Amino acid sequence: MMTQDLHANGPRPPLPVTEADLHAHVDRRLDPARDAEVLRHLAARPDEQARVQAWRQQNEALHRLLDPVLHEPVQWRSPAPRWPWRSLAAGLSIALLSAASTWWARGSIDDARVRAAFVDGARSASTGDDLSGFARRAAVAHVVYSPDIRRPVEVGADEEQALVAWLSKRLGTQVRPPLLKAVGYELIGGRLLPGDSGPVAQFMYHDAIGQRMTLYVTREAPGGATTAFRFGRDGPVNVFYWVDRQVGYAISGGADRQDLLRVAQEVHRQLAPG
């Protein structure tokens, strides 16, 4: 029996547009003909247009946050048993920027004394893009994980007890996610991350409209650091951070400064010793 190519005498119909095509379109890696087909596909699908636009914005946010790290001069150090954050920063930046779209496709103060201390600290805090140390690492971790739709955390809020036990054991100190429903945020879950010289914890929350906020907890707070409450900004990310008994805390999010301050006050109230 002879077979016949049904398209021999006419143009072959366009191939279906896949998720990979959409990512390649955002990364500008399609040839002009295929890119035109993707654009026609998007023109008829506003929901997918919105997704593609969100990926573009996330790529831009990553560039603003990580390009300064990528272009830092390399500082050579003698080998040491440390988590290689700084030495891998440039490589991490390249990997994140090239694979960003794929990653995204994969989730009232009662104590007047605490209120006064935090407000005073916020007034004197820096307002420039001058984050460094664990505060900057917290901002980077927020940008990397908070846009993830399918798996923003390693352990979900439905396993909070196991999450607390695991992170406390790895950090060598008791860590727990504060309850933030009073300030409009609900726990999604948490994960373990590499810090500058050891493990750190990240807890993730979201509000009623899906806006995400992260709490970064580390024992890598600089020696002699005070409990002063500080504010910084890196690209689209606002961060409030402080140190209590050599444990560093950083609240990161896209919320405005006042909203983030309100969350940070509640976190401090619940986690402060005593």
Image (spheres, rainbow, N blue to C red):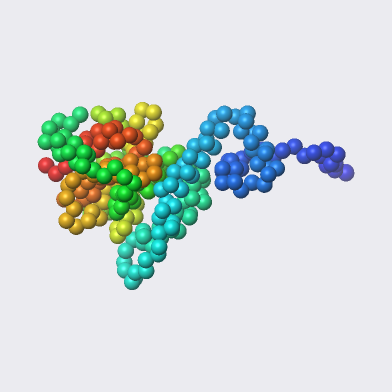
Q: Is residue 163 left or right of residue 20?
A: left
The residue nearer to you, when weighing 259 against 200, is: 259
Residue 70 percent across, percent down from the top left: 43, 56
Q: How many marks?
A: 0
x 25%, y 36%: residue: 261
Q: Please, which residue is most extreme toward the bottom here? A: 78
In the image, 18: left or right of 186?
Answer: right
Indicate the quadrant containing the N terminus: top left, top right, bottom left or bottom right: top right
Residue at 54% x, 37% y is 52
- Percent position (x, y) of residue 58? 47, 42
Quadrant of residue 185 in the image? top left
User: How far from the left and from the top, in percent, is residue 138?
Assistant: 33, 48
The spot of residue 75 in percent (x, y) is: 37, 66
Against 191, residue 71 (above or below) is: below
Q: Choose top left, top right, bottom left or bottom right for residue 240.
A: top left
Viewer-nearest residue: 243 or 4 = 243
Location of residue 188 with respect to 165 vertically, above or below: above
Residue 201 seen from this side? no
Q: Along the horizontal axis of the image, is 29 left or right of 177?
A: right
Position of 202 relative to 211 (above/below)? below
In this orientation, which residue lies closer to the viewer: 164 or 8? Answer: 8
Quarter of the figure that contains the C terminus: top left
Q: Residue at x 40, y 59 (%)?
A: 72
Residue 217 seen by the camera: yes
- Residue sitting at x 86%, y 39%: 9
